[in-house]
Amino acid sequence: MSEDFEDRAREALAQPKNVGEMNDADSVGTVGSPDCGDMLRMWLKFTEKDGKKVIDRASFQAFGCQTAIAVASMATELLKGKTPEEARLLKPNELSGDLGPLPPMKIHCGQLVEQALKSALDGKDAPAKPAVETLAGNLHTEPPSSGKIKIVPFVEDAND
């Protein structure tokens, strides 16, 4: 990894933004695999601006890789003010924001954030309060049957 990337990632980790559950979220997406240990949950809150639905706030909870935490922090800031359509078009390298291009062995972190975002954008209602309060506690439990939280398995590319 380049020293510049490491410095920016370390800085993002020192003061991550928008970490934690959002009780008034309009949608939530959870992706990851307890097998590899990387899981990410993203909450989205929408508002109307100039007659369009836009993302007002985004937050996340991550379990696993520090780079995924740094990318999620950057992405939640980047999402503010974007329409769901604009957000859906963002690619992993764009979601990493000021971190810059991810090193090849960390590209899966951007993909994890992208998948959590798309899962949240596919949500329809605010999530029911999960029986397990934390993402880490949710690693080995069954997903809720309410259908309000969509868990999408994250499959790592063998080339990562």
Image (cartoon, grey):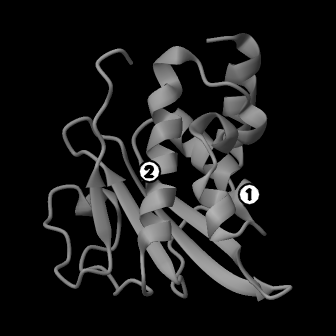
Quadrant of res 34 = top left
Left or right: 37 in relation to 23: left
Q: Secondary structure at mark 1?
A: helix
Residue closer to the observer: 47 or 50? 50
In the drawing, does residue 20 fall left or right of residue 132?
right
Is mark 2 in CB contact (under 8 Å) with mark 1? no
Q: Residues within 10 Å of mark 1 (few under 14, many from 20)?
A: some
Of residues 135 and 30, the one drawn nearer to the viewer in this rendering: 30
Q: Position of residue 99 (x, y in %)?
A: 72, 32
Establish if 119 lies above or below 6.
Answer: below
Q: Name which of mark 2 and mark 1 comes first in the sequence.
A: 1
Q: Element type at marker 2?
A: helix
How far apart are the two marked residues, 2 and 1, measured between alpha carbons?
17 Å
Q: Amino acid at mark 1?
A: Glu
Residue beneath the point at 74% across and 55% down: 78
Q: Quadrant of residue 94?
A: top right
Q: Amino acid at mark 2?
A: Gln
Residue 119 in the image: above or below residue 52: above
On screen, residue 6 above or below 129: above
Point out residue 155 in the picture as x, y percentages from the top left corner. Answer: 28, 36
- Mark 2 highlights which residue? 115
Residue in view at x 13 percent, y 67 percent: 142
Q: 59 or 86: nearer the eye?
A: 86
- Quarter of the image with the N terminus is top right
Choose top left, top right, bottom left or bottom right for residue 44. bottom right
Q: Residue at x 14, y 64 (%)?
A: 141
The residue that appears at 39% across and 18% down in the rendered structure is: 160
99 lies above or below 75: above
Residue 158 horizontal side relative to residue 49, left or right: left
Q: Which residue is mark 1?
A: 77
